[in-house]
Image (tube, helix red, strand yellow):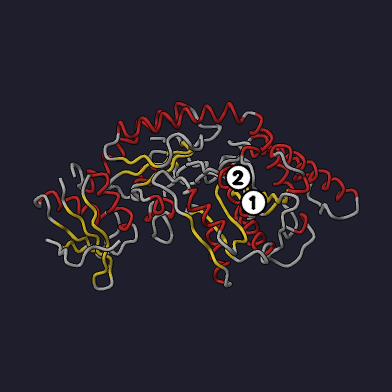
Amino acid sequence: MVVTSVYLDSATAAPLHPVARQALLAALDDGWADPAKLYSQARRARQLLDAARAATAEVLGVRPDEISFTSSGTAAAHAAVLGGLAGHRRAGDTLVHSAIEHSAVLYAAQWHTAAGGRAVSVPVDRLGRLDLEAWSAAVSAPGVGLASLISASHEVGTVQPVAAAAAACAEAGVPLYVDAAQSIPHTPAQELAGWSTLSASAHKWGGPPGVGLLVVRKGTRWTPPYPHDEREAGRAPGAPNLPAIVAAAAALRAVAADAAVESARLSALVDRIRAAVPATVPDVEMVGDPVARLPHLVTFSCLYVDGEALLHALDRRGFAVSSGSSCTSSTLRPSHVLEAMGVLSHGNVRVSLHRDTTEAEVKRFLAELPGVVADLRAEAGVVGL
Amino acid sequence: MTVNDTEQPDEVLDCLGQRCPLPVIALARRLPQLPVGAVVRVLADDPAAAVDIPAWCRMRGQEFLGVTTVDGSPGYTVRRTG
């Protein structure tokens, strides 16, 4: 039997946008030189880089010189956290962050505390929403150098109260870093108000992997947490991957142009999944905020089901999804996000849609999922528990 | 959260070395066989049990009493309420 593959893991990496592919191929021919040099090939490369920066700035509603292209979203997150803390060392050495940050931020926090700094984790509720009261108290405590908040959970889709969290930071005089990797382009950057530093990742919006964005607003102190390099405003060392950057900017412009329509389409499909799964699969916990959520992402956990077995069973039927269950992680720990929310962590599935996702694919997933779960439960002898 | 030391479990399920969801399955199998009010302690060293046993209690309307350390391993105490 030939299995048609259905890719439902855009929160990890979206398929390359056709515009990105075109731009990448063109830039491989045209943009291979070092844009910092003084000959004609370099000038051409510089023009491409400047154009990519200008296009990206326009979509994000920021100044071009506030944007640095990094080698990944992870590199941008590390730089935002560690560079932000280094820039505000005199204000204090405490990093305040939500309990549901991306692991890139949490590992940067770990790096910071290993070097003698402090980190304070702010809890979320059962739906994955930041505890704003605890956040306000944490950022207004003495000695806070930086606050870090994910714009929306990459694991459960819950949108965070960025504007309110930013207001609390502003009142306390603490700069806010927002990890917007899952929100851009679904949420216009302008709606994520009040941040000082922002990061994003091109392969989440249909650009190639290996391109991140680090945006540092004018007037924000940011000190490189690594040796000096003059490229990318001194914020991202090493020669920029220009063809990939050009492709990333082209994809961003294309997806931003129809983000509103596309987000509405995906959100309706997610609503359908949120309604159908608990109606057709017994003992399922739908995870995350059903309303204040990302348009393209939905997570649920199936009681008594091994997450790894579920992923393999779905893969055999052609469905590519992700999971926060411990058996699917290299550390054998459950997802820190599900843990922080206090929701069922085993049998967890994250489905994330993208521009190529069709209604027929979602229908097929919803038609096959109940049988897949039922088979696994029958094999494990847990039916009727 | 710690359980009151005087609250001795009626039964202990040894799920040490078992990976999730096995400890939860063991609890789900055993608890309904015991009378309402019975207290079971699940010994489980899989880190997911710390999340999944309280979550199971919430989904099934059983009472999660807390976690305690038994010979260096976590023990999760649950009372059958229905």
What residue appears at the point 34 percent right and 61 percent down from the top-left corner?
B47
Mark 1 element type: loop
Name the one closer to the observer, B14 or A27: B14
State the mark number for residue A210: 1
Q: Report which residue position mark 2 lands on.
A: A203
Q: Can residue A146 be seen by looking at this rendering?
A: yes
The residue furthest right is: A39
Q: Is residue A289 above or below residue A85?
A: above
Left or right: where A302 falls relative to A89: left
Disc 2 residue type? Answer: His
Which mark is drawn over residue A267?
none
Residue A291 as seen in the image, left or right of residue A25:
left
A315 or A124: nearer the viewer: A124
Relative to B17, B31 lies left or right:
left
Return the residue nearer the eye: A296 or A49: A296
> Which is more N-terminal, label 1 or label 2?
2
Q: Tell me, yes or no, if residue A108 can be seen here.
A: no
For the residues labelled 2 and 1, the Cα–Cα distance comes to 8 Å
Whether residues under marks 2 and 1 lie with C-beta atoms below 8 angstroms apart, the answer is yes
Residue at mark 2 shares a chain with residue at mark 1: yes
Quarter containing the N terminus of chain A = top left
- Which residue corresponds to the image point at 25% horizontal and 49% vertical from the top-left? B57
Residue at 58% across / 72% down in the picture? A115
The quarter of the image holding the C terminus of chain A is: top left
